Amino acid sequence: MTENAVRTAIVAACRQMNALGINQGTSGNISVRHGETMLISPSAVPYETMRPEDIAVMPLGGEYGAWSGPLAPSSEWRFHLDILRARPEIGAVVHSHPTFCTTLAITRREIPACHYMIAAFGGTNVRCAPYATFGTKALSEHAMIALEGRLACLLANHGMIALGESLAKAMWRAVELETIARQYYHSLLIGGPVLLSEADIAETAAKFETYGLREQTEPA
């Protein structure tokens, strides 16, 4: 994709987050790897007025925190940058404040293996990172630990992060994560879930490998 195409895709994805109900206002942010740079949504700009040229550019190497563009990058640029620097297999990062993920994060609960789709996030659970003030290096450090071996995490009293090899996959995982969070929340109201075993999740993960794990649809 050209840089302009990536910029356009980020703007569209920001608007889609709110349309899908996985974010509210300008609380979410999105980054995409492009060559040796990270393109990231700007800070505090309403999505409906955001333009491709507003997207900030940050180098993946060199001076930490350097950026260029007409507007400053999202206040959460640290965990976006740290993730893309540390994990070359990741192409995009989606952060938002969906209702059920955030409800669980407020109680500082992880999401256990309550549904086989938990395997889409790289393990038998989605961890909840400890609390730190938004935009800080401490928050990024907590998130990096919670994301070890995983493709998503909750952020205590805050929201969630979903990763993807592409922007489409990161958005898909963000929607799946909120879906599982909603299902887990409701199961807690009627006695709690019956959890799947590690073997069950490993079998599902193996099937995903051969199935291809379609970008935006759950395996049939």
Image (cartoon, rainbow, N blue to C red):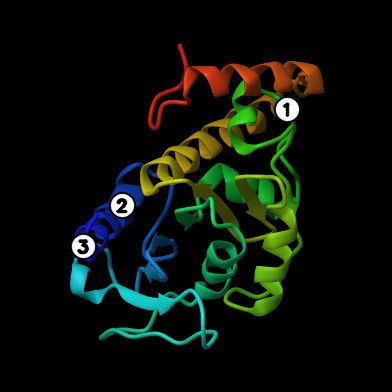
- Residue 13 location (% of width, % of height): 31, 52
Identity of the residue drawn at 20% across and 68% down: 52
Q: 109 and 144: which one is in front? A: 144
Q: Tell me if residue 45 comes above or below residue 208 in the rendering.
A: below
Answer left or right for 162 relative to 138.
left
How far apart marks 2 and 1 lie (CA) works out to 28 Å
**Contact flag, marks 3 and 2 (Cβ < 8 Å):** no
Q: Residues within 10 Å of mark 1 (few under 14, many from 20)?
A: many
Q: In the picture, which quadrant includes the C terminus?
A: top left
User: In the orientation shown, which residue stands out farthest toward the top?
Assistant: 220
**Contact flag, marks 3 and 1 (Cβ < 8 Å):** no
Quadrant of residue 35 in the image? bottom left
Q: Amino acid at mark 2?
A: Ala
Q: Earlier in the sequence, mark 2 or mark 1?
A: 2
Quickly name the residue at label 2: 13
How far apart marks 3 and 2 lie (CA) works out to 11 Å
- Closest to the camera, between mark 3 and mark 1, is 1
Quickly name the residue at label 3: 48
How far apart marks 3 and 1 lie (CA) works out to 37 Å
Q: Earlier in the sequence, mark 3 or mark 2?
A: 2
Q: Residues within 10 Å of mark 3 (few under 14, many from 20)?
A: few
Q: Earlier in the sequence, mark 3 or mark 1?
A: 3
Q: Amino acid at mark 1?
A: Ala
Q: Residues within 10 Å of mark 2 (few under 14, many from 20)?
A: some
Identity of the residue drawn at 59% across and 57% down: 87
Identity of the residue drawn at 36% across and 62% down: 25
- Closest to the camera, between mark 3 and mark 2, is 2
Q: Amino acid at mark 3?
A: Glu
Quickly name the residue at label 1: 113
| Circle 2: element type | helix
- Res. 197 visible in picture: no
- Residue 174 location (% of width, % of height): 48, 43
